[in-house]
Amino acid sequence: MGATVVAGGWNGLFVLVALIAIAAGRVMLTPPGPGRLAPLLALPLLILFGGPFAFTIGAVVAVPFALVEAVIADLVDRLCRWADDTA
């Protein structure tokens, strides 16, 4: 169960990297003006504070999947023990 939650955290970080790349691309491609200011101001905040938040959000989202995985693993274990007992 823990591995699934950690994997969800890493997925959150990968989504953050994509968002940072999009924001950096927007800063580079937008001509100077007011439309360039918002991503330019948000980019340092994303880089500095985004990692812990992205990892935590990804891990929290992964918890229901980890619970389902644990239930399925338990059912498979019981089915295998039942098959060994009847053989």
Image (cartoon, helix red, strand yellow):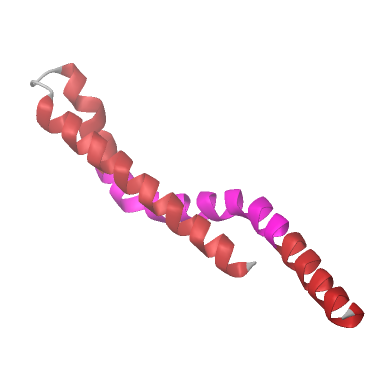
State the quadrant of the C terminus. Answer: bottom right
- Taking depth in this image into account, of 27 and 42 the one nearest to the observer is 27
Residue 39 magenta: no
Which residue reaches farthest left? 32
Kindly identify the residue that appears in the image at 57 percent across and 62 percent down: 4
Residue 82 is situated, as x and y percent measured from the top left of the image, at 88, 74
Kindly identify the residue that appears in the image at 84 percent across and 81 percent down: 84
State the quadrant of the N terminus. Answer: bottom right
Q: Is residue 50 left or right of residue 76?
A: left
Question: Chief secondary structure of the magenta span?
Answer: helix
Q: Is residue 64 left or right of residue 9?
A: right
- Taking depth in this image into account, of 6 and 37 the one nearest to the observer is 6
- Taking depth in this image into account, of 73 and 55 the one nearest to the observer is 73
Residue 58 magenta: yes
Q: Is residue 67 above or below residue 87?
A: above
Kindly identify the residue that appears in the image at 53 percent across and 49 percent down: 57
Residue 53 is situated, as x and y percent measured from the top left of the image, at 46, 50
Image quadrant in which you'd find residue 30: top left
Q: Is residue 55 left or right of residue 71?
A: left
Residue 81 is situated, as x and y percent measured from the top left of the image, at 83, 78
Which residue reaches farthest front? 87
Q: Is residue 6 above or below residue 33?
A: below
- Taking depth in this image into account, of 15 and 75 the one nearest to the observer is 75
Kindly identify the residue that appears in the image at 65 percent across and 53 percent down: 65
Segment colored magenta: 44-69
Q: Is residue 38 left or right of residue 77?
A: left
